[in-house]
């Protein structure tokens, strides 16, 4: 049922519940995964034209020439500039279109679209005949629990995907690296002028808006590597809300050694980056 060129994943929910119940016995070995006997390995990376997914794409492409890149079009407001970014970066990709989310921006939780990543992963999984989906989630945004980038979310989704007729596994090769690390890698391995082609912004306006959280995180990564991100609104002026949040929560996390939301490395790097932004 999976691996077909269909728009929706239509396997009944009760099928998954039944499969999980059958294998939920005390004798089940730790880490055991059920696999279909017919298994064709494909490698797919979700791309957006942003910093994270672009770094992941170029790294993987060296080792896996047949890597498939997939862009999901759900009518996002920043669609046009993401597509331009992919073109400028030379990232050849397939596009999966599903406009059933039309008007979804009304359901934002600030910049978050609830369950977006799970929906994207399901759309890609049904296009495959088994294999690996590479997901560009980084250090500092993968808490143990909470949200559709959490380690528990990925664990449970992987368990779910083993029940597909063509099993699919999600891997996160960047989970131990921050955006600062990614910019450093880019400087060392790719033309630096192409770094500005990556587009990490939640607004529809051309270029980096300078007032969304994604712009701030990229500006911090740039600053930590001796670079300055060009933004429409000065970054310190446009992102005061997020800077105030970081400067409150991150020192507290370091003091209490509570890294359930932000990782230790991200706290240290982001606070240093904010100081550097104030000197630019």
Image (tube, helix red, strand yellow):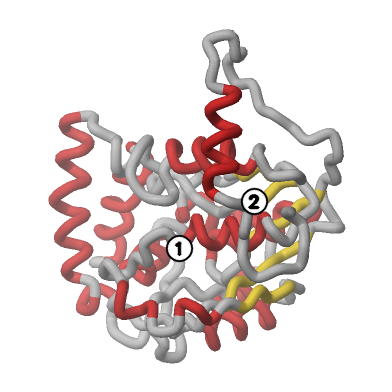
Tags 2 and 1 touching, CB below 8 Å: no
Q: Residue furthest top?
A: 27
Which residue is tagged 2? 134
- Left or right of 146, for residue 69: right
Depth check: give the residue in front, 225 or 119: 119
Depth check: give the residue in front, 89 or 2: 2
Dot 2 alpha-carbon crowd within 10 angstroms: few under 14, some 14 to 19, many 20 or more: many
Name the residue: 75% across, 44% down: 165
Q: Quadrant of the C terminus?
A: bottom left
**Local secondary structure at mark 2:** strand
Q: Can the viewer see residue 52?
A: yes
Q: From the top left corner, tell me how far across and down residue 84 is, in percent.
A: 61, 85
Q: Can the viewer see residue 268?
A: no
Name the residue: 62% across, 60% down: 9
- Say if 117 sits above or below 18 in the image: below
- Say if 33 sits above or below 193 in the image: above
- Say if 197 sits above or below 45 in the image: below
Q: From the top left corner, tell me how far across and down residue 10 is, in percent.
A: 62, 59
Q: Quadrant of the N terminus?
A: bottom right
Dot 1 alpha-carbon crowd within 10 angstroms: few under 14, some 14 to 19, many 20 or more: few
- Left or right of 193, for residue 273: left
* Residue 80 quadrant: bottom right
- Left or right of 131, for residue 209: left
Which mark identifies residue 67? none
Q: From the top left corner, tell me how far across and down residue 191 is, in percent.
A: 68, 69
Depth check: give the residue in front, 187 or 22: 22
Name the residue: 55% across, 31% down: 20
Which mark identifies residue 116? 1
């Amino acid at each position: 049922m999976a691996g077909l060129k269909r728009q929706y994943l239509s396997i009944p929910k009760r099928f998954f519940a039944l499969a999980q119940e059958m294998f939920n016995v005390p004798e089940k070995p730790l880490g055991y995964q059920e696999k279909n006997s017919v298994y064709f390995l494909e490698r797919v990376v979700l791309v957006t034209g942003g910093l994270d997914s672009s770094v992941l794409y170029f790294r993987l492409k060296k080792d896996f020439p047949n890597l498939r890149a997939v862009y999901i079009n759900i009518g996002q407001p920043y669609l046009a500039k993401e597509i331009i970014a992919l073109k400028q970066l030379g990232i050849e990709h397939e596009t999966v279109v599903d406009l059933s989310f039309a008007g979804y921006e009304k359901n934002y939780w600030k910049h978050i679209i609830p369950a977006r990543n799970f929906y994207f992963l399901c759309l890609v999984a049904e296009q495959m005949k088994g294999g690996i989906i590479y997901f560009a989630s980084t250090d500092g945004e993968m808490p143990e629990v909470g949200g559709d980038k959490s380690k528990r979310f990925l664990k449970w989704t992987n368990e779910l995907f083993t029940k597909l007729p063509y099993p699919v596994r999600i891997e996160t090769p960047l989970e131990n690296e921050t955006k600062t690390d990614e910019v450093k890698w880019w400087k060392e391995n790719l033309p630096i002028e192409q770094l500005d082609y990556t587009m990490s912004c939640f607004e529809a306006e051309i270029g980096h808006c300078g007032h969304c959280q994604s712009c701030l995180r990229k500006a911090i990564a740039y600053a930590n590597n001796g670079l300055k991100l060009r933004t429409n609104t000065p970054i310190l002026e446009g992102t005061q809300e997020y800077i105030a949040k970081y400067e409150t929560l991150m020192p507290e996390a370091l003091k209490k050694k509570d890294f359930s939301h932000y990782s230790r490395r991200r706290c240290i790097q982001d606070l240093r980056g904010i100081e550097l932004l104030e000197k630019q």
